[in-house]
Image: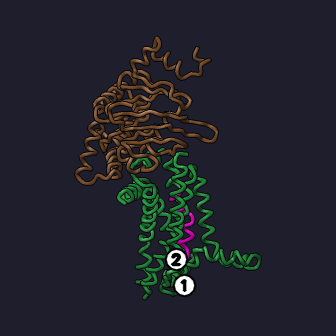
Amino acid sequence: MGGMVTVFRRELAGYFATPVAYVFIVIFLVMAGALTFTLGNFFTRSQADLQPFFTFVPWLFLFLVPALTMRLWAEERRLGTIELLLTLPLAQWEAVVGKFLAAWAFCGIALALTFPLVITVNALGNPDNGVILTGYLGCMMVAGAFLAVGAAISAMTKNQVIAFVLAVAACFFLTAAGSPVVTEFLSQRIPELAEIARAVSITERLGGFTRGVVTARDVIFFASFMAFFLFANTIAIDQRKAD
Amino acid sequence: MQALTALIEIERLTKRFGAFTAVDDVTFSVAKGEVLGFLGPNGAGKSTTMRMLAGFMTPTAGTARICGEDVVERPVAAKRHLGFLPEGAPTYPEMTVTGFLRFCGRARGFHGAALGDRVAHAMALTQLEGVRLQPVETLSKGFKRRVGLAAALLHDPAVLVLDEPTDGLDPNQKHEVRNLIRAMAPDKAIVISTHILEEVGAVCTRAVVIARGRVVADATPAELAARGPTMDAVFRALTLPAAEAA
């Protein structure tokens, strides 16, 4: 447990010791703001909520989260520091979970910095702040799911480009699987797959959170999804730590 | 094998990568007070053996124990007793020397004042005080190596495994590192890998020569030197295939 905290602290400090943190946060905030106010029709909707913002978050995370995760293990392999990290008296899961939590906390910081949007809707109207809070919670769930997949992919390759491209593809699959284009196409041709596609889709589940509906089903889905990929990550590190 | 307690025990350790056998049935043990020079040409299996001993690679067959703890069965307990300098002394480039050493200390369970003392002591031993707030990436090769060495010494481990500790150091720094190893030797079991033969005579009490994954000699440096006209000639005779050695 102590080892996990140590890894967490080092990783989180590592983001801010390099330009990674600043580039990530600035690009995320600019894109989130721009998309919300332009494509999201924030003003013309005349509704005091953050619905337009929340719909764009998965699409932004789709590119930005793999940029965080691609280096998680691939970089350790390239620098050789994986040999140092894994010969410290830590259990392997402590290193895996510590890295994951640091990246997750970092996404949390980026999301928290969108607070001017919350201030704006509160200044313009009377939004349901409980719904906004569950919306943010949903965004954190999506970030966690993407991070867990991306980190597991990073553990399997030394090459950061491969880690990035595969993670984007996986996140895109998770985001797009529930979209009408995919589900309609599948239900006409392969109805069995349409059900599965809808079940693994994170968009629909995020939709619940952004409407203020937090169900045990969705929380269990995200929690077990992350747990599964963190477990896969630990196995991947254990099996091929020296490659 | 000795009357002294063996802190490192390696038994029939084997590592295969596909059809290639990198380490083939290696057995030796190192007692407290011994400095074992692990010699061999590049690619002989030195680093692979050390990585298995440090718990970084899983052996295909055989076992290794550090202070009686099996490195595969009880990896965390074994690693607690071990100070390991990996090949090339990898460090996190963006961290400062102090930050990096504090991370290693914290991972080993030190906190507060004890952590500060450990880090200060390790920096004093390896003469790093002058660069303590510099990011590791800005340091020269010799300093980086000493940062890795400081991280390995930090917790005063009973067993030290150093993969080429003097590689990249200038003659003065080499001399200092050898003095440091000699000073620590009485309380520890130390394994250093090297292909610098003079180093063996300078610091080691025993030499194990490995070639093509197999142990070809296990003797004191003096015994080894007595086998031929020069240490170089002995090394060539031991490590080259019979036909080429002639």
B38 to A170, vertically: above or below? above
In percent of the image, x 35 and y 35: which residue is there?
B189
Query: A37 or B199, which lies in front?
Result: B199
Question: Label 1: chain?
Answer: A
Q: Give how far across and how far down residue B117 sits, in percent.
A: 24, 46
In percent of the image, x 57 and y 51: which residue is there?
A157
Specify the chain shown as green: A
Residue under pointer 1: A44
Q: Give how far across and how far down residue A234 sits, in percent.
A: 50, 57
Mark 1 surroundings within 10 Å by alpha-carbon count, few (fewer than 14), some (14 through 19), many (20 or more): few
Residue under pointer 2: A54
Question: Label 2: chain?
Answer: A
Query: A3 or B20, which lies in front?
Result: B20
Q: Give how far across and how far down residue B98 sits, in percent.
A: 31, 46
**Span shown in magenta:** A55-69
Query: A126 or A111, which lies in front?
Result: A111
Quadrant in the picture for residue A167: bottom right
B119 to B245, vertically: above or below? below
Q: Give how far across and how far down residue A179 sits, in percent.
A: 64, 76
B243 inside magenta stretch: no
Element on which disc 1 rests:
loop
Quadrant in the picture for residue B18: top right
**Residue A54, visible in the rendered structure:** yes
The label number, if any, that marks residue B118 in the structure image: none
Please say if the residues under marks 1 and 2 sit with CB atoms less than 8 Å apart: no
A111 to A14, vertically: above or below? below
**Residue A15, visible in the rendered structure:** no
Of all residues, the one furthest to the top in this rendering is B229
Alpha carbon distance from label 1 to label 2? 17 Å
State left or right for residue B62 relative to residue A193.
left
Element on which disc 2 rests:
helix
Q: Of the residues shown, which amino acid type is indicated by label 1? A: Thr
